[in-house]
Amino acid sequence: MHEFSIAEALAAQVLRHAPVGGRVREVEIRVGALRGLEPEAMKMSWDAVTHDTPLAGSVLRLDLRPWSLVCPACGRTWESPVPFETCRCGETSPRPTAGDELNLMSITVDEDETTAEEA
Amino acid sequence: MSESVRTTRVPVVERVLEVNDQLAATTRADLERRGILAVDIIGAPGSGKTALLEATLRALKGRRHPAVLVGDLATRRDGDRLARWCDQVVQISTGQGCHLDAGQIRDALMQVDLSEVDLLLIENVGNLICPVGFDLGQAAKVGVFAVTDGDDKAAKHPYLVQAADVLLLNKIDLLPYVSFDGPLFQADVRLLNPTVPILEVSSTTGAGLDAWLDWLDRKSADGGASTPIA
């Protein structure tokens, strides 16, 4: 359940970056397939970690990057959510590669116009 | 005074584990400056990490000056086992945590006299998934699989296979008693990581341990030669 540690780190990071006075509505992260992050576990961890904090109620959006597969027989390349897949040419051992990126991409915040003007 | 709400999307693009990674980088620089090879040993519960460390420490007696950090959810049993073979063992109790992180390593290293140490063996919490993504400041990651775990474990844990600098296939003395397709295991590993060395070992019989100790020695020598002093 590394999702929980990641959610904790992410919450602290979002609080560091969020504009003062803004209410965080949405947080977007990009995750490479190598990380093996479970989207449902990640969202559940996010809700648990942000409960009773200024981030409560914010939505976590995950951009899960797929595996890239290259067929050594026919040269076809394609993307897949899983690393091991048979090519449609019949080759059983296409080579899987994936990234291990785990990046906060953006924070979407609601700000009262008046508050923003005063600040 | 307007009561309207303005919604803004703030682009950030920063690693989520940035804080952990920065701590790990500091640890890595410290250890490299001292000429200490640090390895992070990752494997499932029961794959034989502690037994491997016991056999390793026994074999290194008089040859190297190791220190051990051992992560465990609850007990001190691993630390107690290893303390028979090594003067400097620090047990890190992670509580609910399924992996070690860079902060725990830095705290634990405060309890170690590094002046005499040339090898830091870190036994991570038994888990093939969570520990892989958390940089501890190690020079190398060691993945431990056991033949008793089944031949599909490499395929099911691609991050460890791809991130590992060496893979140990442990408990090979039990091969006659379990169904383990060696060629399939090797083929899965090679698809994910074409170059990682795979060392077959048995901590019980000592088979293959020399190759593992040689790997540690070579890695120490490489690290010493190629690492610029900060």
Image: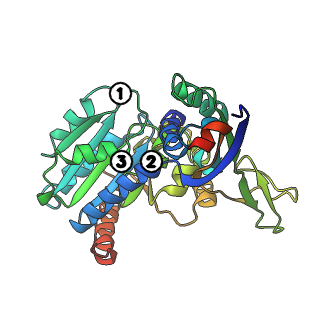
Residues at discs 1 and 2 in contact (Cβ within 8 Å): no
Q: Earlier in the sequence, mark 1 or mark 3?
A: 1
Kindly identify the residue that appears in the image at 35 percent across and 62 percent down: B211
Can see residue B205? no
**For mark 3, what is the residue?**
B102
The amino acid at mark 1 is Gly
Of B103 and A37, the residue lying toward us: B103
**For mark 2, what is the residue?**
B134
Residues at discs 3 and 2 in contact (Cβ within 8 Å): yes
Task: Residue B192 in the image: state x and y as whole percent.
Answer: 61, 57
Disc 2 element: loop
Kindly identify the residue that appears in the image at 19 percent across and 43 percent down: B89
C-alpha gap between disc 3 and disc 2: 7 Å
Q: Residues within 10 Å of mark 1 (few under 14, many from 20)?
A: few
C-alpha gap between disc 1 and disc 2: 17 Å
Q: Which mark is residue B95?
A: 1
Of B38 and A43, the residue lying toward us: A43
Task: Residue B197 in the image: state x and y as whole percent.
Answer: 47, 63
**Residues at discs 3 and 2 both on one chain:** yes
Determine the residue located farthest toward the right in the rendered image.
Answer: A89
Locate residue B13: give its quadrant: bottom right
Disc 1 element: loop
Query: Could you tell whether B227 is left or right of A21 in the image?
Result: left
Query: Could you tell whether B131 is left or right of A108 in the image?
Result: left
Q: Earlier in the sequence, mark 1 or mark 2?
A: 1
